[in-house]
Image (cartoon, helix red, strand yellow):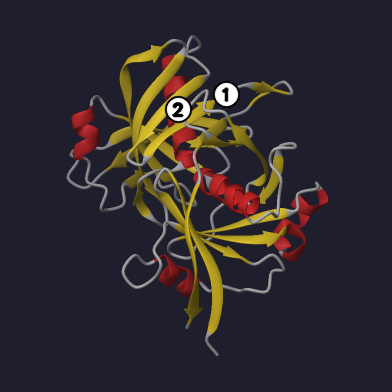
Amino acid sequence: MPQTIAFTKGHGTGNDFVIVPDPDGTLDLTDDQVAVLCDRRFGIGGDGILRVVRTSAIAEGAEAAASGAEWFMDYRNADGSKAEMCGNGIRVFVRYLVDAGWADVDAEPLPIGTRAGVKTVSRSDGTVGEKGFEVDLGRFAVDDSGVLVRTRGGGAPRPGIGIDVGNPHVVVALPDDAELEGLDLAAQPQLHPEPPHGANVEFVVPSDPLVRDGVGSIRMRVFERGVGETLSCGTGVAAAALAVRHWAGPAAPDHWVVDVPGGTLGVRMPQLDGERHVLLSGPATLVYTGEVTLA
């Protein structure tokens, strides 16, 4: 029997999502259903699906529920595959919870369960990036053992650096805006060696000057695994800022502004409880609501 469900369309700097409320965990979307919903010609259209479910109603939410988090972000890529985290998606997820009256982010930071662990989200005042929400992505890992990245029509492969912020990324530095704008990202970049679970690939160009008033600045384009090129990728923005900071050395700042085709996001790398964390801030917008019938 066809099933009709409610949905909301939202985005964070153009990285767009179909938000499906399912607080009691009664909905079981197949990969094909997710792909159809995300299809920009035959469905609603989006880079992925955010299923809003209580941690107590999904097996993957058990650890988050034990830590006190009420909500779990079940994020699926546009091809239906599951993803560990989504930096833009979690801000849009919290915006939905707040607007629906299901959560209060103003009283204290809001914990959200994800496949990359519990992440806390708070309001952002726009000190770095734009106003909206800020998510603590937690600790990160840098792997500079070397990955070669080849793009279609891009000539010789370029070296990249591995950055893990709860999901895997490979970041490539480019010399100027012309190369960044000339990239053909209609085809998936080839990685050598290929990471076991694939990776999002970010291409970055440092601003000139790189640092102004203590804040670093870069531009970025991204190819998301399971999606394709997107206007923005929150965890990719964090990974790109971390990579450039790593390349720049110990004198590099801990505050960054990252321009993507869909807008501007902020990144901070503060010391929290004796460990370096990476935090991502930026806007989250809900566009419209509706109903859709699943085949």
Q: Is residue 97 left or right of residue 131?
A: right
Q: Position of residue 167 (x, y in %)?
A: 54, 44
What residue do we see at 38% from left, 37% from top? 263
Q: Vertically, is 169 above or below 22?
A: above
Marks 1/2 in contact by CB < 8 Å: the verdict is yes
Q: Is residue 156 visible?
A: no
Q: Quadrant of the N terminus?
A: bottom right
Residue 79 image-quadrant placement: bottom left
Residue linked to disc 2? 241
Residue type beneath disc 2: Ala
Residue linked to disc 1? 269
Callout 2: helix, strand or loop?
A: helix
As drawn, the residue found furthest toward the bottom would be: 1
Q: Position of residue 131 (x, y in %)?
A: 51, 33
Q: Position of residue 13 (x, y in %)?
A: 42, 43
Q: Position of residue 287 (x, y in %)?
A: 45, 55
What residue do we see at 64% from left, 49% from top? 98
Category of crowding for the residue at label 2, using alpha-carbon neighbours closer than 10 angstroms: few (below 14), some (14–19), many (at least 20): many
Q: Vertically, is 34 above or below 69?
A: below
Residue type beneath disc 1: Met
Residue 179 image-quadrant placement: top left
Of residue 246 and residue 221, the one placed in the foreground of this image is 221
Q: Is residue 151 left or right of residue 62?
A: left
Query: What is the CA distance from the residue labelled 1 to the residue labelled 2?
Result: 9 Å
Q: How many marks?
A: 2
Category of crowding for the residue at label 1, using alpha-carbon neighbours closer than 10 angstroms: few (below 14), some (14–19), many (at least 20): many
Callout 1: helix, strand or loop?
A: loop
Q: Vertically, is 279 above or below 199?
A: above
